[in-house]
Image: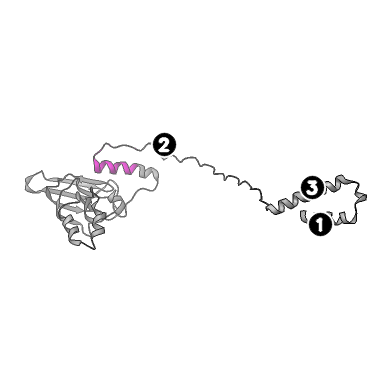
């Protein structure tokens, strides 16, 4: 995950923070910098290992480098191997051990701009990782190529059994039609005074109509009816 996310180049020492001290050290660094130095000197961060990342455009499954590892203190056998492009190569080197590492690149690949690297490295939880996938990291042109690459990378680093991605996971899900709910129109709230006036006007109209014939309506009544119509309009 660190190599995929940060894509470092050259030689990088990888650490883990099992106790969550990095955030605390950042908080006290401006006030007590010596305390931060003491925490780092006391190996508060566990060493995962050392990553050697090659730059360039490697050809997949083609030799891009040769590596030779000579453990110090005669605690292991000399290892020589060919590293293939597009892959991760690991060598278990315990934390208390160190080894002399020599890498010779080929095919346009480089380490810090050089074709040859000779360095003495200390071990860690994982040991030595050679990242021959190139920079920038090539993750495939589509989801099917990525599904073929990612399990291989996990297998090469962890040593776990290679597990293929289920092809059904790569199928495009059916598009769902998204319908917006219809907004219900809220009834308009009429003012209390206007509602009372309309109810009063309705009662007066009923009284006028029930009281007699329209021909018997006086001028006063017509004026009242006109006023009521103005209220209702």
Using a 10 Å C-alpha cutoff, classify the residue at mark 1 as few (fewer than 14 neighbours), some (14 to 19) or many (20 or more).
few
Residue on which disc 2 sits: 168
Residue at image location 28% in from the left, 50% down from the top? 2
Side (left or right) of 171 relative to 71: right
Give the CA separation, mark 2 to mark 1. 77 Å
Q: Position of residue 57 (x, y in %)?
A: 30, 54
Residue 109 appears in the rendering: no
Element type where label 3 sits in the image: helix
Q: Secondary structure at mark 1?
A: helix
Q: CA distance from mark 1 to mark 3?
A: 14 Å
Q: How dense is the environment of label 3, judged by Cα within 10 Å: few (below 14), some, or many (20 and up)? A: few
Q: Is residue 42 visible?
A: yes
- Considering the image in quadrants, where does the C terminus appear? bottom right
Q: Are marks 2 and 1 in contact (CB under 8 Å)?
A: no
Name the residue: 28% across, 42% down. 154
Residue sitting at the far left? 73
What mark, if any, has residue 24 been given in the picture? Answer: none
Nearest the viewer among 82 and 47 is 47
In percent of width and height, residue 163 lies at 31, 37
Q: Which mark is residue 203?
A: 3
211 within the magenta span: no
Residue at 58%, 44% (x, y): give it. Answer: 181
* Nearer the observer, 93 or 78: 93
> Label 2 to label 3, Cα distance in Å?
74 Å
Region rendered in magenta: 148-164
Question: Of helix, strand and loop, which mostly describes the magenta segment?
Answer: helix
Q: Position of residue 186 (x, y in %)?
A: 63, 48
Q: For the view shown, which residue lies furthest in the right direction?
A: 215
**Which image quadrant is residue 179 in?**
top right
Using the image, tell me which numbered label, if any, was put on residue 227.
1
The answer to whether 101 appears left or right of 56 in the picture is left
Q: For the residues carrying marks 2 and 1, which lies nearer the camera in this image?
A: 1
């Amino acid at each position: 995950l660190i190599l995929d996310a940060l894509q470092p180049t050259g030689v990088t020492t990888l650490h883990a923070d099992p106790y969550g001290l990095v955030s605390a050290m950042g908080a006290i660094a401006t006030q007590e910098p010596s305390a931060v130095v003491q925490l780092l000197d006391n190996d508060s961060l566990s060493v995962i290992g050392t990553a050697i990342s090659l730059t360039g455009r490697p050809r997949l499954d083609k030799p891009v480098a040769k590596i030779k590892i000579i453990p110090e203190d005669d605690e292991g056998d000399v290892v020589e191997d060919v590293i293939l492009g597009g892959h991760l190569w690991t060598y278990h080197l315990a934390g208390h051990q160190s080894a002399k590492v020599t890498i010779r690149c080929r095919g346009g690949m480089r380490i810090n701009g050089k074709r040859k690297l000779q360095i003495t490295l200390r071990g860690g939880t994982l040991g030595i990782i050679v990242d021959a996938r190139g920079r920038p990291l090539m993750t495939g042109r589509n989801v099917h190529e990525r599904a073929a690459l990612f399990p291989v990378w996990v297998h090469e680093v962890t040593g776990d059994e290679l597990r293929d991605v289920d092809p059904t996971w790569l199928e495009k899900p059916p598009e769902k039609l998204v319908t917006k709910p219809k907004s219900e129109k809220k009834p308009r709230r009429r003012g209390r005074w206007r509602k009372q006036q309309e109810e009063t006007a309705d009662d007066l109209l009923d009284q006028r109509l029930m009281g007699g014939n329209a021909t018997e309506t006086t001028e006063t009544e017509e004026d009242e009816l006109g006023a009521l119509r103005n209220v209702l309009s």
